[in-house]
Image: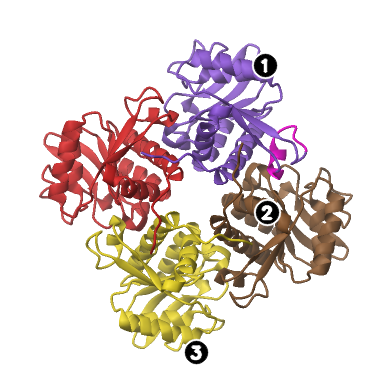
Chain colours: A brown, B purple, C yellow, D red
Amino acid sequence: MSADRESLCRVVAELGAQGWCQGTGGNFSLTVSQDPLRLLITRSGVDKRRLSPADLMLVGPDAAPVPEETGRPSAETALHCRIVAATGAASVLHVHSVANTLLSEHFASQGGFTLRGYEMLKGLRGVTTHEAPVFVPILANSQDIPRLAGEVEDLLARNPDLRGFLLAGHGLYTWGTALEEAKRHVEIFEFLFECAARRTVFRPFGG
Amino acid sequence: MSADRESLCRVVAELGAQGWCQGTGGNFSLTVSQDPLRLLITRSGVDKRRLSPADLMLVGPDAAPVPEETGRPSAETALHCRIVAATGAASVLHVHSVANTLLSEHFASQGGFTLRGYEMLKGLRGVTTHEAPVFVPILANSQDIPRLAGEVEDLLARNPDLRGFLLAGHGLYTWGTALEEAKRHVEIFEFLFECAARRTVFRPFGG
Amino acid sequence: MSADRESLCRVVAELGAQGWCQGTGGNFSLTVSQDPLRLLITRSGVDKRRLSPADLMLVGPDAAPVPEETGRPSAETALHCRIVAATGAASVLHVHSVANTLLSEHFASQGGFTLRGYEMLKGLRGVTTHEAPVFVPILANSQDIPRLAGEVEDLLARNPDLRGFLLAGHGLYTWGTALEEAKRHVEIFEFLFECAARRTVFRPFGG
Amino acid sequence: MSADRESLCRVVAELGAQGWCQGTGGNFSLTVSQDPLRLLITRSGVDKRRLSPADLMLVGPDAAPVPEETGRPSAETALHCRIVAATGAASVLHVHSVANTLLSEHFASQGGFTLRGYEMLKGLRGVTTHEAPVFVPILANSQDIPRLAGEVEDLLARNPDLRGFLLAGHGLYTWGTALEEAKRHVEIFEFLFECAARRTVFRPFGG
């Protein structure tokens, strides 16, 4: 598991270097076992640019630390558990970027947006042509994590081929069948979000 | 105190690497003692990307170097002292970014602006939901530092829960109960400023 | 050939660090021999920021691996082969940037766009004044690589002085008489694309 | 002189890391002697991100290499010589950024633009308040370097307090009484250019 911890730390550091974990934002997990569910996940409030193996902890399917752990996992651990249970993901990554924050706020009222026509879409598992439309759903943000976890579960039940979703004004959740695929999905989504954001006329910020 | 100096240098280097201390801009302090007040603060005109412990000096409550120091502290040292006296901050950080410069200029006439609806707001101490509005006050810029220090003192007296403020066309001051919290506040504010700036229709620059 | 592999890895790492190979995007080749044609090219799906010599493989003129190789080269290897056959290039580099993606989508219907008036144009081989107009052709994107390779061949036959072209919504192909020249061409085109993109009123993204 | 070479290489590497020397763009000099004039200057076409002392060469007042040198200095060496002769600068730095390229093109017809109201202006030698207007002149670009050098000489004769100027569609020239001051001037100008560019409604690029 030491190699797992180091792999996750390395990936998080790469994402942090791209500005996607500002202010200790974001949380990240690696599935150590599917049954029983065991996730290595970032502790609450740690600096993602300087993550060390000790900043990770082990949780069970109820999002609670396993008995031998101390400390508090990320507040959104329950979302990771639900995503892994629904998709079998090997890793779930959640990042905050300016583009994903703005798009998720702007398009929240229409429930999501569709990306199409970009070659980079092929970086998402199962997409084989730039012509395939990829819908990115947006859920309302909430501080009620159990309720949000339920909505995520419903979303995934209705959309088994989903590769990621947004929380409004909050950020991206994406995952993969391997850690490297999950990381690739972050980069692909963020690249496409930046393309979309530069083409979006946002509602003016009035202060 | 050697560890303090190294910690502050490391944090400033991280902020500098994000482009927030261009042209020797910005100044940074760590509270070594509250009573009597003793701050470690960056010397005037040093390169923040390559800060070494010797680029820091010790000042007292009057913003003057303690007797055993030589050289000149940052011009804005009095602002740091006033903020620490009013808030008990462990660290005060002042950065220049393009987004904070533009927003502080644009909204100066209305005295500030309000951020709300963003999950990242929760990175500010005491904010527990994205729904909480966070007002960012803007003070007029001035080269009269004693007068500005008085205005800062008044602002903090009226707003004990403030986490940061802007000087118009100048930059952000933020602080924290620990160095890491102050740094987190910089990253949170700057992330949210970039979100706001990308949604702002600035008055055209006419040359 | 070990030095060749290391040189190409170093150049790709530099391009990756600039954000032009997100999500394993992009592919890169170095011409080891012109007759018979032998290209060192990136394997399919490798992380371009962490490229190692083992992530490169040798292909022949038909874009197929030479007999002693195992594994699969980049899907777009046939484009590299055609470009080298037509231009004698020592290296072909293909990158994805937000600016090249947006411009190639926006101007696809007019078949390309013209850059002029910028000193940086002189960084393209053969351009000696900022006043020279440089046309950047855009080909429709396609998942039919053999057909696309034929179109590239036609394009190069009609435009022997071409230094690069775009695939719509996909990215830039450029090359050079040496690896360093090809890399310089990437940087010059991307700089100019960013200039053009910041001046372009893109069709609004409606979601 | 070995220390001079290393200092200049270090400064150029820092500027290059900020994206201001793409595609081997930019040129940089350090004044080794004022009388007779001797400048260490970057050779033509070298990669500024990986500059080594051997990439610098010594030139005299006529912009020609001193007898013991071989190779070709930057094409714009004569501009460096004229600036040093007129201002006594210890270093002249010339960079290309997207912001300086766009602003210098946009405002060329009005001969320049004025920056004011920004605290960062105080990073320019002699500026003591954000209220001081700083005019940035723009000269038409030209491939006739001797003629351009004459225009630079005239500009400096008319404006002895100038800290930098732009060539239209080309880039920034700035200098300082020490290498560190020249570097600070680059960062200050580029920060302010980015502020101005984000507020500028550029003429649309039509392709």
What subunit carries mark 3? Answer: C
In the image: residue B135, left or right of residue C195: right
Question: Foreground mark, 1 or 3?
Answer: 1
Find the distance from the CA under tag 1 to the CA under tag 3. 78 Å
Badge 3: residue crowd in 10 Å (few <14, some 14–19, many ≥20):
few
Instruction: Kindly indicate whether the residues beneath marks 3 and 2 are on one polypeptide chain.
Output: no
- The chain letter for the residue carrying disc 2 is A
Residue C140 vertical placement versus B7 (above, below): below
* Amino acid found under the numbered disc labelled 3: Pro
**Picture residue at 66% right of the left edge, 23% below the top:** B89
Callout 3 secondary element: loop
Q: Residues within 10 Å of mark 1 (few under 14, many from 20)?
A: few
Mark-to-mark CA distance, 3 and 2: 49 Å
Q: Which residue is mark 1?
A: B157
Residue D169's x, y, as percent?
30, 52
Residue type of the residue flagged with mark 1: Ala
Same-subunit check for callouts 1 and 2: no
Q: Which residues are magenta?
A: B118-128
- Callouts 3 and 2 close, C-beta under 8 Å: no
Image: D73 above or below C36: above
Instruction: Please give the residue where the numbered disc 2 appears in the rendered image.
Output: A104
Question: On what subunit does the disc labeled 1 rest?
Answer: B
Question: Residue B107 lies in what quarter of the image?
Answer: top right
Q: Amino acid at mark 2?
A: Ser
> Which residue in the protein does label 3 denote?
C67
